[in-house]
Image (spheres, rainbow, N blue to C red):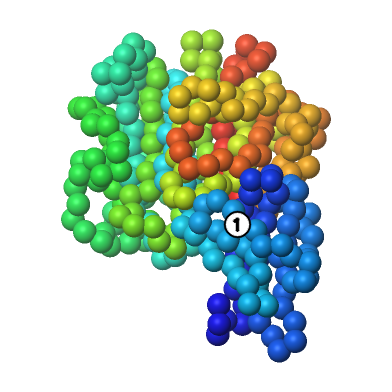
Amino acid sequence: MAGYDRVVVSVPVVGPDGLYARGALIKGSSTSSALLYSSDGFEWTRLRDDDVTPLAYGGGVFLGRGDGIFSATPGASSRLVNISSMGGVEAQPMISGFVVSGGTGKNVLLRSTGPGLVNFGVTDALSALTPQLRNAGGQSVDDRSVDVLPPESAEPVSEAALRVGAFAQTTGDRATLLRLRPSPFSWLTFPAEGATGLALAEIYDADRAPGASTLSNLSTRATLTPVHSTLTIGFVIAGAQARTLMLRAVGPTLRNFGVARPAADPVLTLFRENGTVIAQNDDWGKAVEARQLRQFAPQRGAFPLDEDGKDAALAITLPPGSYTFQIRDRSGGGGDILGEIYDVP
């Protein structure tokens, strides 16, 4: 670390002892900075260098003391690389929101699949659909919009889909590949007139290599009905390090934004790729991590949930891998629901 005045490992790393750690090195003539540690990732305690025992954590990160000063060597980072949402589409579109953060732009593959779901045994697939990308102002976005940067290559959509591991679509499904400027966007999957059924909306990080820009603050709004009673959202963490996420299933709080018929009592269940349940929440205010959820929301620009409401949420640190979470309405009445994923640095 010679020659550095300041080196920071800002992403909390969870060690085998269950403690969070991050480090800052300030090289000076008489003193050095110290290691920070925390039991919950929020309230940090600073230790002077003469109080620190060297710590070796997983994920390629070492935090400790060497040659009289701190050393901090971050390993490979991790990031969210895609989100997929499957739910019923009837009179209203399924709306998948996302934010391109940092850097100058990101290649994003956007897909809406209805007819092609039949190949996977879905008997109630949406027979016809029309997708649309919109910017933060609600305007439609295409390859001529100011929100879109020139493509880095002439790669066809089908080849990009193969590269990121997406299944082949069929006639009637839709996809587009765009390089987007940093900004919020919405990908809407509209049903054709009179059509109803299940649809799958997907947002892929299509960059060929990790860069400065990321996908963050991912969300899906859909309507739960007696026929289509579940919204399923999948996501993938790629890289070498665990990431802390805030997952939310918002129903009753949507009334604060003029939604007339939100789902009354959403339940959020998180699964591993193999179907094993990792965690579940019904009423977010009763969750053990409720304090963290209150702190995360303003940090990530999320609106507050009603304190005594029936919305559901989780704050959880997950290793790289594929996950899904399902949202159901415990009351059985259905209604509008918003599923959200917030990446918490």
Closer to the camera, 232 or 5?
5
Query: Which residue is found at the position 66% from the left and 82% from the top?
Result: 27
Q: Relative to 245, is 111 on the left or the right?
A: left
Foreground pick, 177 / 61: 61
Residue 104 location in percent, x, y? 41, 65
Q: Residue at x 59, y 19 (%)?
A: 328
Residue assigned mark 1:
56
Q: Secondary structure at mark 1?
A: strand
Q: Position of residue 163 (x, y in %)?
A: 25, 44
Q: Can you say which quadrant of the picture contains the C terminus?
A: bottom right
Q: Amino acid at mark 1?
A: Ala
Looking at the image, which is closer to me, 185 or 151?
151
Residue 99 visible in the picture: no
User: In which image quadrant can residue 176 be found?
Assistant: top left
Residue extending farthest to the bottom is: 29
Q: Please say if 269 is above or below 11.
A: above
The structure residue drawn at horizontal position 74% and vertical position 65%, both measured from the top left corner, is: 52
- Residue 319 rendering spot, x and y as whole percentages: 53, 42
Is residue 168 shown above or below 121?
Answer: below
Dividing the picture into quarters, in which one does residue 259 lie?
top right
Residue 80, can we see it?
yes
Q: Nearer the viewer, residue 179 or 62?
A: 62
Q: Quadrant of the N terminus?
A: bottom right
What is the quadrant of residue 194 in the picture?
A: top left
Looking at the picture, how far across and down is residue 211, in whole percent?
Answer: 40, 61
Q: How many badges with numbers are in the image?
A: 1
With 205 as the anchor, is 57 left or right in this view?
Answer: right
Q: Residues within 10 Å of mark 1 (few under 14, many from 20)?
A: few
Question: In the image, what residue occupies the spot 32% across and 24% down?
Answer: 114
